[in-house]
Image (cartoon, helix red, strand yellow):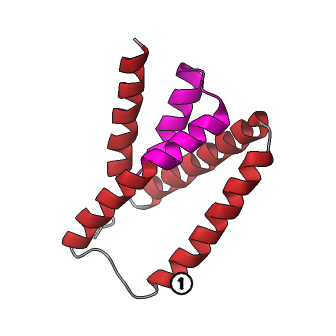
């Protein structure tokens, strides 16, 4: 039974990741709440699962001509540095603090998504 639950979590995370919504927004809560995985382990699994999803998404977007190379390294270098520092910080924080921080992030993300849905009504998207 555990295999099917893990498989379901992976499929759902992959679908959301492929849609650009961030598979971790579903994968981490599913792993922690439904399967009892510790928060730090769930975040680590999410990071590992993100790598192949990101590589696939990048190749699809590059083939579609949607990757803009101008300024790419000015984005990548700070992102890599902040990811490394955040990972180091997360290794020292208790699981409860990570859960609360991730919950706050999801609430903030939902407000941004709701705001975008409300204010983009009737506007043409690219």
Q: Is residue 33 magenta?
A: yes
Rendered position, 11 above or below 63? above
Residue 22 is at least partly visible in this image:
no
Using the image as rendered, state which of residue 64 and residue 53 is in the foreground: 53
- Range covered by the magenta-colored residues: 20-49
On the rendered structure, is 15 left or right of 32?
left
**Is 39 displayed left or right of 97 in the figure?**
left
Where 107 sits versus 78, above or below?
Answer: above
Identity of the residue furthest to the left in this view: 63
Residue 13 in percent (x, y) is at 40, 39
Percent of width and height locating residue 118:
46, 54
Q: Is residue 42 magenta?
A: yes
* Badge 1 element: helix
Secondary structure mostly seen in the magenta stretch: helix
Q: Which residue is drawn at 48% across and 36% down?
A: 27
Residue 124 image-quadrant placement: bottom left
- Residue 126 at what x, y percent from top left? 28, 70
Residue 39 can be seen in this image: yes
Residue name at image x 67 percent, y 54 percent: 87
Q: Residues within 10 Å of mark 1 (few under 14, many from 20)?
A: few
Q: In which quarter of the image is the N terminus?
A: top left
What residue is pinned by disc 1?
74
Q: Determine the residue located farthest toward the bottom in the rendered image.
A: 70
């Amino acid at each position: 039974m555990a295999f099917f639950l893990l498989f379901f979590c992976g499929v759902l995370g992959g679908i959301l990741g492929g849609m650009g919504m961030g598979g971790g927004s579903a994968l981490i809560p599913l792993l922690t709440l439904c399967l009892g995985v510790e928060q730090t382990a769930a975040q680590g699994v999410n990071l590992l699962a993100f790598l192949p999803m990101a590589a696939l998404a990048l190749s699809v977007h590059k083939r579609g001509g949607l990757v803009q190379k101008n300024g790419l390294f000015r984005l990548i270098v700070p992102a890599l540095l902040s990811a490394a520092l955040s990972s180091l910080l997360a290794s020292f924080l208790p699981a409860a603090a990570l859960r609360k921080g991730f919950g706050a992030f999801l609430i903030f993300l939902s407000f941004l998504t709701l705001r975008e849905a409300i204010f983009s009504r009737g506007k043409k998207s690219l």
